[in-house]
Image: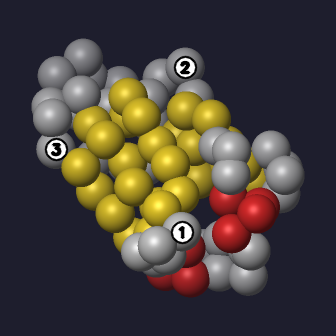
């Protein structure tokens, strides 16, 4: 991966908004509804917390679901 591409530095599930919020290394934030992501569409809020950012910063791991989400540029 290119070093100049933004990477996830923080991620969380916002229960109030019902969105996954990802903060990027370029200081932007992206949020989306879990039902809009393949594999997360049937997840409960409890399954979305906690989540882990991959070492590359291009993926999220949801341990309670044993599921991964890859973020491409």
How far across and down, in percent of the image, does residue 59 sit?
Answer: 53, 40
> Label 1: which residue?
15
Camera-side residue of 48 and 3 = 48
| Secondary structure beneath label 2 | loop
How far across and down, in percent of the image, does residue 72 sit?
Answer: 37, 48
Graded by Cα atoms within 10 Å as few (under 14), some (14 to 19) or many (20 or more), the crowding at tag 2 reads: few
**Residue 56 vertical placement versus 15 (above, below):** above
| Secondary structure beneath label 3 | loop
Does the rendering let one see residue 70? no
Left or right: where does residue 7 sit relative to residue 4? right
> Label 2: which residue?
55
How far across and down, in percent of the image, does residue 56 sit?
Answer: 48, 23
| Secondary structure beneath label 1 | loop
Colour mode?
secondary structure
Left or right: where does residue 23 sit relative to residue 20? left
Which mark is in front, 1 or 2?
1
> Label 3: which residue?
28
What is the distance, in whole Å, between disc 1 and disc 2 at their CAs? 25 Å
For marks 1 and 2, the one nearer the N-term is: 1
Cβ–Cβ under 8 Å for marks 1 and 2:
no
For marks 2 and 3, the one nearer the N-term is: 3
**Residue 2 vertical placement versus 47 (above, below):** above
């Amino acid at each position: 991966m290119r070093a100049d591409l933004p990477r996830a530095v923080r991620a969380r599930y916002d229960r109030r908004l019902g969105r996954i919020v990802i903060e990027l290394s370029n200081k932007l934030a992206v949020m989306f509804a879990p039902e809009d992501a393949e594999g997360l569409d049937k997840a409960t809020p409890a399954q979305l917390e906690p989540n882990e950012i991959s070492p590359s910063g291009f993926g999220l791991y949801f341990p309670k679901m044993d599921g991964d989400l890859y973020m491409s540029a």
